[in-house]
């Protein structure tokens, strides 16, 4: 097993444990450029991997009461529908096109990492449920199409539209990521069969295991590290990866 795959898996878990997002943004490039897997297989495996790590990471937040079950349902159920549609639509485009879209998503995600975060949302206006549902569908569709958990969009959406405290938004995000990742993975089985691809369970198992360890570490140190500095560092990583993937995708298309 490539040592960079193992280190990348730990980073995936750290990201999910610390920020409630970012796991699949790392997973897809890790599987494609380090594990040398085709794009569509990497996307399917990413959904399964991030779903497992998020499910484990969410347990700590559940125990501490840092989950809004109302918004898990309000955002999560529509996002599952969107994820199914996104995974279904992926069979009609090439893996290179999916990577191009993925790189754009990474660059958008990097912008959210540089935005300042406060500990709680004190805006008095009531949650706009229709916006939350619509955001769930859109984020889910994106997740299914390019294999991202969408936490970098879910956390701000719950924070701004759901009026949740930031840590509660992270806990709720991990459960929503789990929901949409697994439904996307199940639908992707049809896509893999169509392209004669099979899951590499050795890679998947190692990344899930190391990712869970990274998630445990991330949850333990989340309160001891400056969130904004961590987000900025992660944002820089996303910019570099996003530009690289965008450039290679354009080169392959041309």
Image (spheres, rainbow, N blue to C red):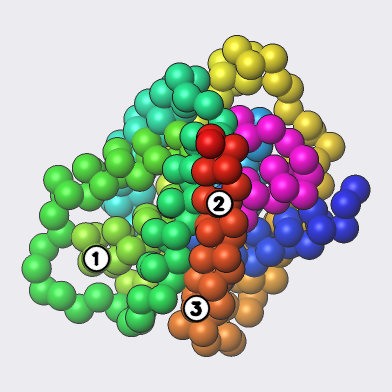
Question: Outermost residue toward the front?
Answer: 254
Q: Residue at x 70, y 20 (%)?
A: 197
User: Which residue bears the numbered disc 2?
Assistant: 247
Quick one: SS at disc 3? helix
- Label disc, if present, on residue 160 of the rendered structure: 1
List x then y, in percent, for residue 192: 63, 20
Quick one: SS at disc 2? helix
Distance, label 3 to label 2, CA atoms, is 23 Å
List x then y, in percent, for residue 96: 55, 34
Quarter of the image for residue 4 reads: bottom right
List x then y, in percent, for residue 159: 30, 66
Label whose residue precedes the other's in the sequence (3 or 2): 3
User: Which residue bears the numbered disc 3?
Assistant: 232
Q: Say whether residue 19 is visible.
A: no
List x then y, in percent, for residue 114: 41, 76
Query: Mark 2, residues whose alpha carbon is within 10 Å: few (<14), some, or many (≥20)?
Result: few
Q: Residue at x 55, y 51 (%)?
A: 247
Does residue 54 appear left or right of residue 30 in this picture?
Answer: left
Inspect the magenta stretch and tell me whether residue 55 lies in it. Answer: no
Q: Residue at x 79, y 33 (%)?
A: 201
Query: Mark 1, residues whose alpha carbon is within 10 Å: few (<14), some, or many (≥20)?
Result: many
Distance, label 3 to label 1, CA atoms, is 20 Å
Distance, label 2 to label 1, CA atoms, is 33 Å
Dominant SS type (magenta): helix
């Amino acid at each position: 097993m490539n040592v960079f795959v193992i280190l990348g898996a730990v980073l995936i878990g750290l990201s999910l444990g610390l920020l409630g997002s970012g796991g699949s943004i790392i997973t897809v490039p890790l599987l494609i450029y380090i594990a040398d897997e085709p794009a569509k297989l990497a996307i399917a495996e990413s959904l399964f991997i991030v779903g497992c790590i998020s499910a484990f990471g969410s347990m700590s937040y559940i125990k501490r009461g840092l989950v809004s079950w109302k918004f898990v349902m309000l955002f999560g159920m529509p996002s599952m529908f969107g994820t199914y549609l996104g995974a279904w639509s992926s069979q009609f485009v090439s893996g290179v096109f999916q990577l191009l879209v993925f790189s754009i998503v990474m660059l958008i995600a990097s912008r959210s990492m540089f935005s300042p975060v406060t500990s709680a949302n004190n805006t008095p206006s009531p949650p706009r449920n229709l916006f939350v549902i619509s955001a769930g569908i859109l984020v889910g569709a994106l997740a299914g199409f390019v294999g991202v958990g969408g936490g970098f969009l879910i956390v701000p959406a719950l924070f701004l539209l759901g009026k949740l405290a930031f840590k509660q938004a992270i806990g709720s995000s991990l459960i929503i990521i789990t929901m949409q990742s697994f439904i996307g993975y199940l639908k992707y089985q049809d896509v893999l069969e169509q392209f004669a691809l099979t899951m590499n369970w050795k890679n998947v198992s190692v990344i899930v295991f190391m990712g869970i360890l990274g998630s445990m570490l991330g949850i333990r140190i989340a309160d001891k590290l400056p969130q904004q500095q961590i987000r900025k560092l992660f944002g820089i990583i996303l910019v570099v990866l996003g530009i690289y993937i965008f450039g290679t995708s354009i080169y392959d298309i041309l």
